[in-house]
Image (cartoon, rainbow, N blue to C red):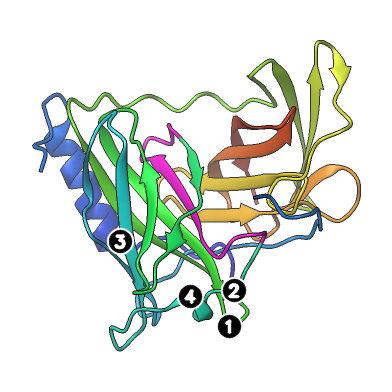
Amino acid sequence: MTAGVRVAAFAALLAAVLLLSAIAGRAIDPGADAGESPSTHHAAAAVPGDDLHLVARATTLAAGTPRTFTFRVLDGSGATLRTGAFQIEQGRRMHLIVVRRDLRHFQHLHPTQDADGAWTVPIRLPAPGVYLAYADFQTAGTRQALGVDLFAAGRFQPQALPAPSTTAHVDGYDVALASSHDAGRLSFTVSRDGAPVTDLQPYLGARGHLVMLRVGDLAYEHVHPLAHGALAFDTGHAGPGTYRLFLQFRHGDAVHTAAFTHEVAR
């Protein structure tokens, strides 16, 4: 499956836009890390017509309240894919990326699957709004990403996207971004108290993870670092546009997420 394919059909995006228009300014009615083995991978969102699709038990959740989110991955005949169909990739059979549609409130979760094929994970949507959850997994050697909207009841106050920047500050760390537009490569350096951090810990089998979401159509990329020592990613599959980048790295036995707004002009 080709990386960088658009996450959702136009009709689904239009429906979400109409819903946001309807709820703006008023309430929405409720209703173990693996060892390091760095490599480069891309996960592209499935398009209409693909055999696999995601079905969630419930998509309306109370904002700020921990809940269990349950979903299944079905094949073209409607049968649930069981554990044996999902390959371990970066230490997990399933990664769930959750972000609000204004590209805020990023989460990277790891559901578990029961004997009946249902995936469950504790989730907390911190503020009202419409979120997109991407189920990111691998079957038969092919990376897949399937999306579903989640709704958190309450008054939705969308936030403007921060201006493009090459620096971010998170949890006492300073993260700098350098890009090579010709090669489609993004490189990051991490420092703390003015000193470079050179002892990043493995996180899910790699020195870091990078999720890219494109403004507008929310095209999705999940990239792992190149094999050499630098914290660098090949993002050559990403098409032109404005992206929100979420870089995750592990240091001090904790996972940290640095966010950037980045322009890809090709």
Q: Secondary structure at mark 4?
A: helix
Q: Which residue is mark 4?
A: 83
Q: Nearer the viewer, mark 4 or mark 3?
A: 4
Task: Estimate the spatial distance between the alpha carbons at disc 4 and disc 3, rounded to whole Å.
Answer: 32 Å
Of the two numbered discs 2 and 3 on the same chain, state the one appearing first in sequence.
3
In this rendered view, identify the residue nearer to me: 185 or 258.
258
Name the dominant secondary structure of the magenta segment.
loop
Image side of residue 26 versus residue 189, left or right: left
Query: For residue 182, which numbered disc appears in the image?
Result: none
Q: Image point 47% across, 37% down: which residue? A: 106
Q: Which residue is mark 2?
A: 87
Task: Estimate the spatial distance between the alpha carbons at disc 1 and disc 3, rounded to whole Å.
Answer: 28 Å
Q: Position of residue 122 (x, y in %)?
A: 38, 45
* Residue type for callout 2: Gln
Magenta residues (range): 90-105
Q: Which residue is mark 1?
A: 140
Q: Position of residue 30 (x, y in %)?
A: 11, 38
Q: Image point 56% across, 62% down: which residue? A: 4
Task: Estimate the spatial distance between the alpha carbons at disc 4 and disc 1, rounded to whole Å.
Answer: 12 Å
Q: Position of residue 215 (x, y in %)?
A: 45, 43
Q: Are marks 2 and 1 in contact (CB under 8 Å)?
A: yes
In this view, 148 is above or below 130 = below
| Crowdedness near tag 2: few (<14), some (14–19) or many (≥20) residues, C-alpha within 10 Å | some
Q: Which residue is mark 3?
A: 10
Of the two numbered discs 2 and 1 on the same chain, state the one appearing first in sequence.
2
Q: Secondary structure at mark 2?
A: loop
